[in-house]
């Protein structure tokens, strides 16, 4: 079974805790870190300082995630089961001593950090985040806090991280480390998902979680932050992270001024929200980054051939940027130290697309349209980048925008396109064949602020058959995706209703599940109130993240969504109804 992030434990909370300075410098001198700290007081910063600290990250948009560790040796296979990834040790309940034998075969002699950086850079990626220690507990650098590390436990014996940091810096890429602070399946006491604190599937696991934090996690985070000039620290799966346990780790982040952290440390800290394997229909108001695999695993799995196409990945990048997020796209290198060829092909294709269309991605902000039938849009000041994914057959692209347009240009060729407004509808006359089947971009220059119509569902009058305190029906229509509507745990089926104030013609909808683990994967039914009765307009399953779908256009004033959840507590983070433009 594939396991994943315990997002239920997290809140998107952009507490500002760092000074706004560059990271290309030695650790802050004279900073005394009190690792016994038990309060969460960290360096305060003004909104302007925060903006300055986040500026490179916000402009970068596209990064490479690398899940690399001892799990690349079994490469997803244990016994007859070939479906594992970096969770193999926990999923297959491999005893510690047996798992440690894999390290004897971890000898990545083909590892070429300069080549990796070059491939990432050519793909248009502006930063890299690599696993310094994943849940298997293995340190990819020589650590003094645990013998379970690259120098002491493998024939390779050399640091893997330092050379990548140097290579990235030399090419002007930012570099970050992923560090699994809670879960550690080798060092005694480290958290083991599925087990109570201090316990695991092997007697060797038994131990104190606090001792593990004190003797392994805290010293290792200190090693990482003092030895390597990293720009990002990417925490994961915060199990048992009370404020007292978060505090010493949070305090260490001061060692690296300018550091950017994600929201998976615990305690509501962190700069960036981390939707995993999905693109939220709304995006989120603060800084956020979708992380995603190219196939179905983070760590290398030799048998996983369920690859997303280059076109899908290019479209994901555009969609994420259109909602104001970053895209952290994963590769699981082999135990030899190579990227799988299929991953390299995708890097190559995305790079080619970005060389032509990079202006529509880097440095952009969220687009102004809550919905476009034919694609998505990003924005840079007075230029809207229209990413046309579904090219109009009749050569006319309708843009639901009231603001005056100055010019439209096809990004790929520089060709000027004529803009008209028949019947008041902004229309761009385009060639009959899409210049790029993956995503053709039109740069539309406009006058003033973009004026678009709000969604009929945002702010709709909401009611539901049941809800938990704090998870009121209105949360599903607040347009942010941050808070949820959810029914109590003893309820398996519940409905949510939106009264739009006036009849509207709806041709598509989007919904996000609450971002919790395990995923809810609910059954949904959407109905419209027509001729005095409820009529079904769509039904299906969420797939564990959410749904975006077109329907036969329907005009109604009231819509009802029924969610059914076997685990109990059905709900949604957001339901958006999109009108015909
Ligand atoms: C998770 C998983 C993990 C993966 C990560 C990426 O929480 O536990 O294996 O590293 O998500 O987001």
Image (cartoon, rainbow, N blue to C red):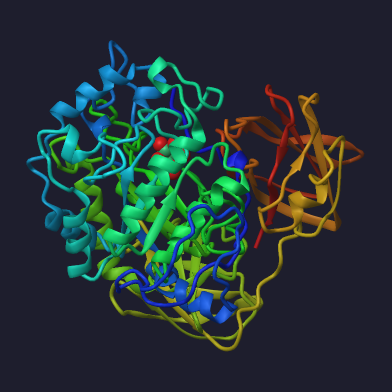
Which quadrant holds residue 523? top right
- The residue positioned farthest toward the top in the image shown: 80
Residue lying furthest left: 109
| Closer to the camera in the image, 415 or 369 | 369
Q: Name the quarter showing ligand 1.
A: top left
In x, y percent, where is residue 258?
Answer: 42, 71
Residue 358, located in which quarter of the rendered image? bottom left
The spot of residue 544 in percent (x, y) is: 56, 34
The number of numbered badges drawn on the structure is 0
Q: Is residue 165 left or right of residue 281?
A: left
* Observer able to see residue 7: yes
Judging depth in this view, the residue of 570 and 412 nearest the camera is 570
Q: Residue at x 80, y 59 (%)?
A: 459
Residue found 24% across the figure and 24% down from its top: 100
Front one among 172 and 529? 172
The residue closer to the viewer here, 14 or 212, is 212
Residue plotted at (26% across, 37% down): 69
x and y, in percent, of residue 499 in the image: 86, 51
Q: What's the residue at 75%, 59% (across, down)?
A: 458
* 357 w.r.t. 241: above or below: below
Of the 4 image quadrants, the one containing the C terminus is: bottom right
Q: Is residue 180 visible?
A: no
User: In the visual, does 300 lie left or right of 536?
Assistant: left
Q: Quarter of the image for the N terminus: give it.
A: top left
The answer to whether 270 is drawn above or below residue 242 in the figure is below
The spot of residue 212 in percent (x, y) is: 44, 36
């Amino acid at each position: 079974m594939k396991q994943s992030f315990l997002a239920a434990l997290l809140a998107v909370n952009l507490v500002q805790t760092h000074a706004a300075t560059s990271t290309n410098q030695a650790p802050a001198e004279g900073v005394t870190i009190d690792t016994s700290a038990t309060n969460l007081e960290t360096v305060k910063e003004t909104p302007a300082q925060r903006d300055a600290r986040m500026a490179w990250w916000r402009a970068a948009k596209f990064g490479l995630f690398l899940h690399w560790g001892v799990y690349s040796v079994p490469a997803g296979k244990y016994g007859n089961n070939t479906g594992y990834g970096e969770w193999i040790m926990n999923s297959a309940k491999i005893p510690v001593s047996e798992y440690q034998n894999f390290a004897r075969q971890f000898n990545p002699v083909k590892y070429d950090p300069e080549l990796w950086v070059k491939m990432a850079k050519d793909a248009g990626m502006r930063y890299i985040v690599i696993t310094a220690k994943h849940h298997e507990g293995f340190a990819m650098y020589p650590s003094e806090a645990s013998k379970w590390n690259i120098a002491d436990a493998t024939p390779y014996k050399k640091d893997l991280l330092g050379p990548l940091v140097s290579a990235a810096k030399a090419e002007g890429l930012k570099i970050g480390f992923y560090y699994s602070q809670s879960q550690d399946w080798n060092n005694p006491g480290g958290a083991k998902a599925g087990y109570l604190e201090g316990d695991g599937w092997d007697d060797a696991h038994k131990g104190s979680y606090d001792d593990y934090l004190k003797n392994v996690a805290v010293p290792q985070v200190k090693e990482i932050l003092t030895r390597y000039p990293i720009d990002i620290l990417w925490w994961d799966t915060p199990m048992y992270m009370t404020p007292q346990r978060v505090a010493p780790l949070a305090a260490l982040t001061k060692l690296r001024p300018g550091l950017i952290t994600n929201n998976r440390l615990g305690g509501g800290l962190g700069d960036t929200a981390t939707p995993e394997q999905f693109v939220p229909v709304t995006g989120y108001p603060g800084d956020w980054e979708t992380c995603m695999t190219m196939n179905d695993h983070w760590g290398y799995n030799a048998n996983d051939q369920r690859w997303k196409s280059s076109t899908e990945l290019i479209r994901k990048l555009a969609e994420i940027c259109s909602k104001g997020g970053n895209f952290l796209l994963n590769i699981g290198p082999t135990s030899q130290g190579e990227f799988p060829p299929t991953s390299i092909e995708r890097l190559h294709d995305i790079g080619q697309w970005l060389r032509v269309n990079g202006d529509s991605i880097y440095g952009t902000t969220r687009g102004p349209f809550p919905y476009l039938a034919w694609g998505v849009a990003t924005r840079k000041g007075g230029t809207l980048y229209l990413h046309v994914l579904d090219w109009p057959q009749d050569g006319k692209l309708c843009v639901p925008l009231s603001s005056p347009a100055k010019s439209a240009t096809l990004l790929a060729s520089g060709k000027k396109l004529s803009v008209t407004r028949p019947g008041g509808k902004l229309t761009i006359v385009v060639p009959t064949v899409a210049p790029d089947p993956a995503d053709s971009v039109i740069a539309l220059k406009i006058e003033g602020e973009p004026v678009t119509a709000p969604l009929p569902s945002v702010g709709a009058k909401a009611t539901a058959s049941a809800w938990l305190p704090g998870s009121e029906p209105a949360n599903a229509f607040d347009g942010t995706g941050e808070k949820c509507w959810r029914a109590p745990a003893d309820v398996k089926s519940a409905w949510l209703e939106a009264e739009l104030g006036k009849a509207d013609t709806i041709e598509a909808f989007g919904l996000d599940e609450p971002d919790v683990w395990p995923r809810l994967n609910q059954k949904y039914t959407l109905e419209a109130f027509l001729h005095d009765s409820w009529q079904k307009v769509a039904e299906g399953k969420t797939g564990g993240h959410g749904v975006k779908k077109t329907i036969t256009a329907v005009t109604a004033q009231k819509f009802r969504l029924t969610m059914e959840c076997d685990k109990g507590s059905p709900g949604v983070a957001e339901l958006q109804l999109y009108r015909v433009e």
